[in-house]
Amino acid sequence: MGPLPKPEVIFTHESDLDGFLSGLLLQRLADKLFGTKIPLEAYHNHSWRQRDMKEKSAWVADMTFDTRLDREDWVVIDHHAYDHPPKKARLIHDVNKSASLLCYELCKEDGMGSPELDRLVHLSNVADLYLDQDPDFDAATDYAGLIKIYQFWNIYDLIEGRVERLLNHPLLQVLEVKRKVENPIGFEWSSVRVQQISPTIGFVQTIIGNSSMIVHRMLDEQVSPYPVLLYAMRRGNTMMVSIRSKNGEAIKVAEKLQGGGHANAAGATLPRSALGVNEAINYLRQVLNPAPSKNAALQSLENAFSALDNLKLG
């Protein structure tokens, strides 16, 4: 692989630890390669889809590759499935590695590895790929919670952009206690509060605890009849939904909502008309339960008349 082009800006995913580490690692790599600090911008999926791509060169991490990014001197480092192979951009891609691990491998090629970064990237990889059999899984979810709960730029400012400061951060003690105390309570409460969105999709009300871990446990223990579960959260003035499954259905649901993600862990931003949970549920039912076609309605009517005729004949 040839030298990386100098980026005007580095883009990353704002919603999670994987995007956080990816962005900071790429910013550090660019500083070493080009001797200057490249601006870092972070986006949620919805705002990212609406952004105009005006830059002549850029590095993009943890964002699904699409044709908008297929440009000369653009580098995309990602692990989500994509539809169209690149023709102009350089795509560094592996569905079996987190984006932060792919970015870290680039850093290590330039001698920028360290035991601290080894540990942080490992934890990010475990959390983002949801490797729940890994012995560090609980710790990884606590680290991931730093970004989920305290938000991307708050943590960035708190550690002054020095990613090693995340290791053994005092806030992790808060997250460990929350996980041990809140998650069992939240699981019991949420397990009996699942509303049907469609015959295969359930909406999980969450009130306390790590919603993602609670919903994954519900899927593992099959406490509801739905193979796809989703839950909502508020981010500023918008509602977002996270979608979880076990057999690859989550991404298909996300795409219907103009979202994206992984096969079994995806998400989407709801329109501003969905201001609360009830509005979100109504919207989801409308979108995920398409009206039957006219042909289907006529067929149902014909079946009804046929059944009536059979009764008369009988």
Image (cartoon, rainbow, N blue to C red):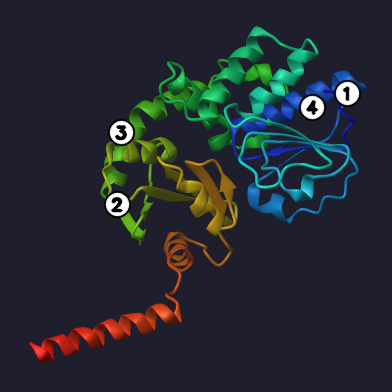
Q: Which residue is mark 3?
A: 184
Nearer the N terminus, badge 2 or badge 3? 3
Measuring 38% from the left and 81% from the top, which residue is drawn there?
Answer: 297
Amino acid carrying label 2: it is Arg
Residue farthest to the top, as pictured: 115
103 horizontally vs 29: left or right: left
What x and y, as percent, mark residue 24? 73, 27
SS state under label 3 = helix
The numbered mark at residue 193 is: 2
Residues tagged 3 and 4 counted as in contact (Cβ below 8 A): no
- Can residue 143 be seen here? The reply is yes
Q: Amino acid at mark 4?
A: Gln
For label 1, the residue is 3
Q: CA distance from mark 2 to mark 4?
A: 43 Å
* Residue nearer the viewer, 39 or 91: 91
| Badge 3 or badge 4: first in the primary sequence | 4
Considering only vertical position in the picture, is 172 above or below 302?
A: above
